[in-house]
Image (cartoon, grey):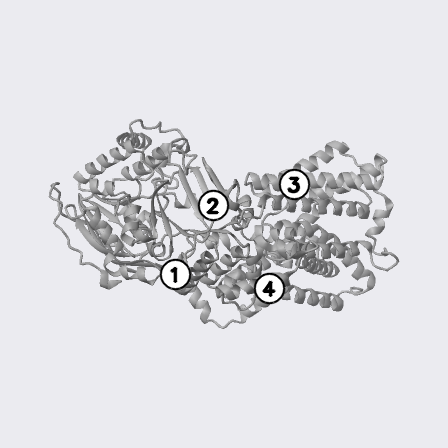
Amino acid sequence: MSTVGAEARADRAERPSLWVRLGAVQRRFQLFQIIALVALFEWGTWTVTDFATKQSVYSMLVTASFLGLAGAGQTIVVLVGGIDFSIPAFISLGAILMSELTGSHGWAFVPALLVIMAFALVLGAVNGYVSHRFRVPPLVVTLGMASVITGGLLVWTHGQQTGSPPTFLGRLSSVNGTTLGIGIPPVVVIWAVVAIVLGVVLRRTLAGRHVYATGSNPVAAELALVRTRRVWVGAFAASALLAALLGVLIAGYAGAGGTTLGDPYLFEGLAAVIVGGTAFGARGDYWRTVLGALVLTVLSTVLVGKGYSSADQQIIFGILILVVVAGYGRELRLRDRI
Amino acid sequence: MTAARAPAAVPPAAPHKAQPAGILLEVHGLAKAFGPTRALRSCTFELRAGEVHAIVGENGSGKSTLVKILAGVHRPDAGEVAIGGRRVRGRPSPRAAQESGVVTVFQEVLVVGPQPVLENVWLGTDGVFARRVPVAEKRRRAEEALGELLVTPPPLDVPAEALSLSDRQACCIARALVRDPRVLILDESTSALDVATRDRLFATIQRLCAQGVGVIFISHRMDEIQELADRVTVLRSGQSVATLGRGDADTGVIVRHMTGEDHLTAGVETVPSRARVRGEALLSTEGLRLHPAAEPIDVEIHGGELVGLAGLEGHGQDAFLQALRGAGANAGRVMAGEEARTEIGSPLEAFRAGVVYVPRDRRAESVFPTLSVLENFSVPTLGSDRRAALVRWRATRRRLGEYVQRLGIRLAHPNQPIVALSGGNQQKVILARWLAARPRVLLLNDPTRGVDLGAKRDLYRVLEQLAGQGVAVVMVSTEVDEHVELMDRVLVFREGSLSRTLSREQLSRTALISAFFGESA
């Protein structure tokens, strides 16, 4: 193993380093993703009618906001070295509790919101605690949690959702909505605020730095006095909270709750994280997910405009993920070299 | 190094056993490097049929590498291995080695815990679909082998994890026995065995030898070697320096060969003189036991002291260091802080009392590979760079700058990935990480392992500076020279207890290595 490694290393040292330099640039900012975004947008503008109109761009931004928010918690969890498959369940939890409590049980908005947040924080924390304490892969734990939540919601509503969420929620995600009189859909502004807050938290707070340390090398983090279990619990709780709040927004957008409302956001949210360039184990940040969500949304709009079916889109998304992930593998080796 | 090589005088075959004198295994000029580390430089010896051939050497002398080459785990860079007169060629594999009759029992107890004893004994003998040995035969031979090794052999159907450590190791040895070895390699396999099993193993070895099997026996216990070995080959720094016959191999001679006294005495004179101050007590232990049967340890460590922890690998020096950092303490107390009065029960408490720990395995335990030098540096101390809960990276960069100068870290930019640095520079960044916490007690776990010579010298300089400033430095090192050159005091551990304390005046390579083996120099 070691001799082979040494030879390979020597080989690469001799090779001219265009790839190396591109890799270095790519690591610092997401060159590939930015080029792809601009190129896709241009392609859409030239080949799809009414692609670059205000209406169409806003509608893309609203879609990207949902996608980006779905990828927010996932970004934290992926950075810490886990994965969260219960995000769709928490989205449904937020959506259904909000519609039922306010619509059928006559609660006010704020108490309903607080109950949703409390549920999400506790159940999300359980995700993190169980997978860390018992060393179970978070994939399994979060799938189990998703099943419990979805089943619980069905039992509670007897399989029939009757309520609808407050109408002002719908206006938050309307394409023609305004924020404080400015003509930008509120959900886009919410997304921007979340992005800024998450960016600062990850970059400039101790909690954020501990996320990176834990994801990068959990053993070293523990020895560097980072309490990695707290970090895991916190990351999964944050992910659940963000997903449940997204559920509230989606309930407003859809006009009702539903147990399958969150399903599309599992794969697409994860895709936004990965396509944006955040890798399992502490490389990346939320800005990359923002970029990933924009790339995916523009791509999907172009494909729809060109008449591709959703099955075709699925294939293309899947290939995109495979390509990006294979690119990480290459980057890893490049990183070893320098 | 080559100048020190003694001619290998090959004594005649041991006369006390009437054996065919055929050569089972021949090793010539074997060498193996792992990256920059030359684990084995030139190893030459031969194993005769019916003999027990012991291989001895201090830590890092190349014994394990030799065993792994013979067992087919590693491929040698140079040199030859011949089994039964035929040179071994091609890609090595443990399976190929076993098929040519070389069977190895390793130091680690390698059992598949949830599987029954029977499966563990016969592990790896069946094909994917076909059973090569009938079950009845398997049971009979497993019982036979275990019965030979153990007074009360375990039932064959209990899972291996239910057995004691000693019995599990006996399963590993039984696994080797049922394979009918021509060459049996025991790599410190006795360290996990209890006394009764060990004695029975020795009887088994004698029986095998009488049948013409050759045994390569590796042990750190001189008494075992004296009892069992027909010949002893000594390894030093990856070279076989001597092969001694039964009559010549008394412990003193073996130790002299292991230490290579003839060319290393000069090293002691290179110690830079520094003012040795002895400040207040900063760390102490009371009745500390590393395992229930070990002797309690009471030690007091003062500011300004450089204390070395030494011993053969796994004899307690590492566990002691862990206990000092507040992790894995068994019975007893560890005290730190002012006049060593605060009891510490966790690494965090130790840290707050001014005790920091620099782990051994840089890659696995220290480095955050995806993060930058600056981020790697700052993890435990980042709290001090905050204003209104937000980290000011400029302040962190300034702090790092201090240590870049002081430790001589070669760095292009604080934001470059840490993995882009050389091993020595990475180690300096890690040291900077912990020095930035301004420790009163610095615990180091073999910090110069895999570090180049220049970086080693820098590190020694820094440690002496720290001691001069009144910091207590406690360091596990596997390098004897490091102890001899650097330390004020060396605590030597043996079988989980503190066996000897050597003061500066008593320190020499011979004294230290003798102490490793429980002998007084």
Q: Quadrant of residue A234?
A: top right
Q: How packed is label 2: few (under 14 Cα within 10 Å), some, or many (20 or more)?
A: many
Percent across and percent down for residue B461 are 43, 62
Mark whose residue sits in front, 4 or 1: 4
Residue that appears at 79% across and 36% down: A161
Q: Alpha-carbon distance for marks 4 and 3?
A: 37 Å
Disc 2 is placed on an element classified as strand
Of tags 2 and 4, the one toward the viewer is: 2
Q: Is residue A330 above or below residue B235?
A: below
Q: Looking at the rendered structure, which numbered label has been put on residue B398?
A: 4
User: Mark 2 is on which residue type?
Assistant: Leu
**Subunit ID for the residue under disc 2:** B
State the SS at label 3. helix
Separation of disc 1 and disc 3 at Cα?
44 Å
Disc 4 to disc 3: CB gap under 8 Å:
no
Drawn side of residue B60 relative to residue A51, left or right: left
Q: Is residue B289 above or below residue B414?
A: above
Q: Which residue is mark 1?
A: B35
Quadrant of residue B275 in the image?
A: bottom left
Q: For the residues labelled 3 and 2, say whether their Cβ atoms are less than 8 Å apart.
A: no
Residue type indicated by callout 1: Gly
Q: Residues within 10 Å of mark 1 (few under 14, many from 20)?
A: some
Question: Are the residues under marks 2 and 4 on the same chain?
Answer: yes
Q: Nearer the viewer, residue B168 or B453?
A: B453
State how far apart marks 3 and 2 are (Cα).
38 Å
